[in-house]
Amino acid sequence: MFGLLKPNKEQVGSRLREVKDELGLSFSEYGNRLGLIKPTINSYVRGYSLASLEVVEKVSELSGKPVGWFYFGEIEEYIKEYLLLRGQEALLKDHPDVPLKIKEDFLIGDFKNPGWETDFGYPVEEFIDDCYAEIHIKLLREYVQLLALNYLNEHTALDDSKKEDASIFLSSEVMGYYEATRDFDYGDTEQVMAAVEIYYEGTLKEKEISFDDGYLVGRLINILADDDETEQLISGLSEELTGKRFSNFFGGNELIQVFQSLRPELLKLYAETTFDEYYEWFEK
């Protein structure tokens, strides 16, 4: 009936008491409505023992509240408690809206399916895991990039534009390490900072930033950082499409700037995309 997350008998008792008080019943009257003697209903309400499903269903009929609410509260509370059980306290502290996002996807998402519901109409734990996985990886990337930027601010004299590039480069490297090892998680500041330092010292310090150009996104980022390479890119593309080469000898710098204006968006894409996704885009 229950998965990894089990009802808390004290919380269930508190919700049973809430209904009792809303109905204005004494313990004896409450017990009579449910076919229970006073000591038994008292034990449930005080959280000494967990009310059976049969009892909860009767209280549900009396109050109009769903059975799942007595066991787990609102859907977002159920999701939050499950994620806390899975050790996601740090992320939920910084992003308390995550359970509501998962609830919304459960109720009105594109892939809503009755098979995702428990006996109580709440999302099965596998559904929460799947939804959370996408949210988690996005927020973890942002977290790693922020820590990388903090490291660069504290330990380097790079100018702001280079710091932004470097933070994206470092976060991508660290996330590649994460995807291979799962050695850290959101909130593990010391481990992340140690990984950032290793990659900075080993691959970036006193070197020009060069993004992985095995796929088009990284290649374009590198090209658009340089005026001459951007000019060559435009010229090659122009010759391919129109048979005419491009040169900025007599002007045309505006076109170079337009092409280079794509670079911030490409950097954002680079920061958010995994190499598995690149494989699906360009090879699969």
Image (spheres, rainbow, N blue to C red):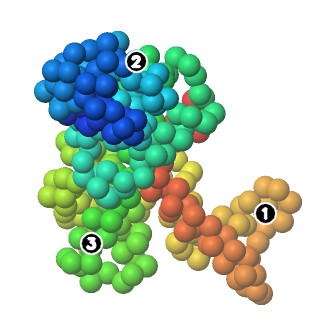
Q: Nearer the viewer, residue 102 or 77?
A: 77
Q: CA distance from mark 3 to mark 2?
A: 56 Å
Snapshot quadrant of residue 99: top left
Residue wearing tag 3? 150
Mark 2 in CB contact with mark 1 (< 8 angstroms): no
Sequence-wise first label, 3 or 2 = 2
**In the rendered image, which quarter contains the C terminus?**
top right
Does residue 269 appear anywhere in the picture?
A: yes
- Image coords of residue 20 (percent x, y): 33, 34
Q: Residue furthest bottom?
A: 250
Amino acid type indicated by mark 1: Ser
Q: Give the residue at x 59% y 28%.
A: 112
* Above or below: residue 249 compared with residue 120: below
Residue 238 - label: 1
The residue lying toward the viewer, choosing from 56 and 107, is 56
Q: Label 2 to label 1, Cα distance in Å?
A: 75 Å
State which quadrant residue 239 falls in. bottom right
| Residue type for callout 2 | Lys
Location of the N terminus by quadrant is top left
Q: Amino acid at mark 3?
A: Asn
Q: Position of residue 121 (x, y in %)?
A: 48, 24
Element on which disc 3 rests: helix
Q: Report which quarter residue 80 is drawn in.
A: top left
Label 1 crowding class (10 Å Cα cut-off): few <14, some 14-19, many 20+?
some
The vertical placement of 180 against 259, above or below, is above
